[in-house]
Amino acid sequence: MAIVSLARLGEGTEYKTALLKLLRPFTEMFEPVPSSLFIYVGALYPAQAELGVNPHPQLAADLIEWAYEGGVTEIKLAAQAAPGFDFGQSWQLAGYGALKSYGVDVLDLAAAPRLPRRSSLGLYSRELLLPRPLLQADCLINMGKFRVAEGRIFGSALGNLAELAELAELPRETEAFPRALVDIYSMVTPDLHIIDALSGKRGWQPQKQDGLLAASDAVALDMTLAALAALPAAPMEELNLAAQYGLGCANAADISLVGDVEMMISG
């Protein structure tokens, strides 16, 4: 049974309060405490937090505080600029520059050395070049932003991994993209996925209630995001493929929602 945790962000609810509730089902994953933690926030756009384009920097700040309080001594925060943008500008405008005071190492994965990693699946390619720091992480958290446009989810747990292999030249609409995404997930499997589903001014979050979602299974989490957006999961080929190859759960009956499950209520 795959577990997906939900924590509502209502009026007056702080990110830290919601985050602590969100992480409750996964505390055993951090026992013993990892010596180092790698937080990947995806491809950042030069956009302010309230627009709802990037994961909110306050979520990253509270996650860092939670890790330090739990005994983690080394934390790396990594991202890259969205295609066509400058990393420094994107990092600052997205609000992540303020996290320098937390004493974490900041990595631009686009500039990081890469290592060839072979895929046991080879759905798109038998070998991809992936960032070496990420591959060497003791504990990896994948943190993304929930985004929906034109009836399609383009901000999700699996989708957040796309830029790791520099798939910018591979359109998401092509048949090859889901296969490449599943290849990446077979080579880089984060310990935990956290999705920020706080509504922004761009209108890319269609759900009725704001909140956070987390799971160790990216497929189960993205299945839940599809339900949250009232979209059918069947067209999301990457979920079907990943489940077919044993990388996650795409059967709604085998996904257990815990926490603030009222987030899933529409209308």
Image: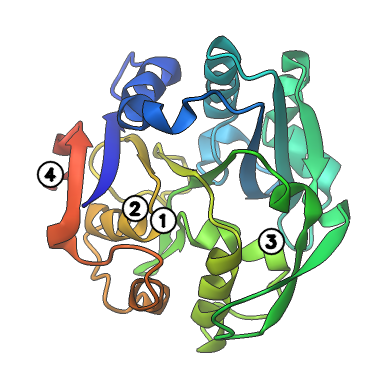
Dot 3 surroundings within 10 Å: few (below 14), some, or many (20 or more)? many
**Which image quadrant is residue 149 in?**
bottom left
Place residue 240 in its image quadrant. bottom left
Give the Cα distance between marks 3 and 4. 34 Å
**Mark 2 sits on what residue?**
221
Comes first in the chain, label 1 or label 4: 1
Q: Position of residue 140 (x, y in %)?
A: 59, 42
Q: At x 21% / y 52%, what residue is drawn?
A: 1
The residue at which mark 4 appears reads as 265
The quarter of the picture where residue 103 lies is top right
Q: Nearer the viewer, mark 3 or mark 4?
A: 3
**Which amino acid lies under the numbered mark 2 shown in the image of this protein?**
Leu
Measured as percent of width and height from the top left, residue 248 is found at 35, 63
Q: Amino acid at mark 3?
A: Leu
Up the image or down, 14 lies above or below 120; here it is above
Side (left or right) of 209 relative to 189: left
**Residue that label 3 marks:** 164
Q: CA distance from mark 1 to mark 2?
A: 5 Å
Chain-order first, disc 3 or disc 2: 3
C-alpha gap between disc 3 and disc 2: 19 Å
Determine the CA span between mark 2 and mark 4. Answer: 16 Å
Q: Is residue 110 left or right of residue 146?
A: right
- Across and down, in percent, residue 179 comes to 52, 81
What's under tag 1, amino acid-wise?
Answer: Ala
Q: Earlier in the sequence, mark 2 or mark 4?
A: 2
**Residue under the point 66% across and 26% down:** 35
Q: Which residue is mark 1?
A: 218
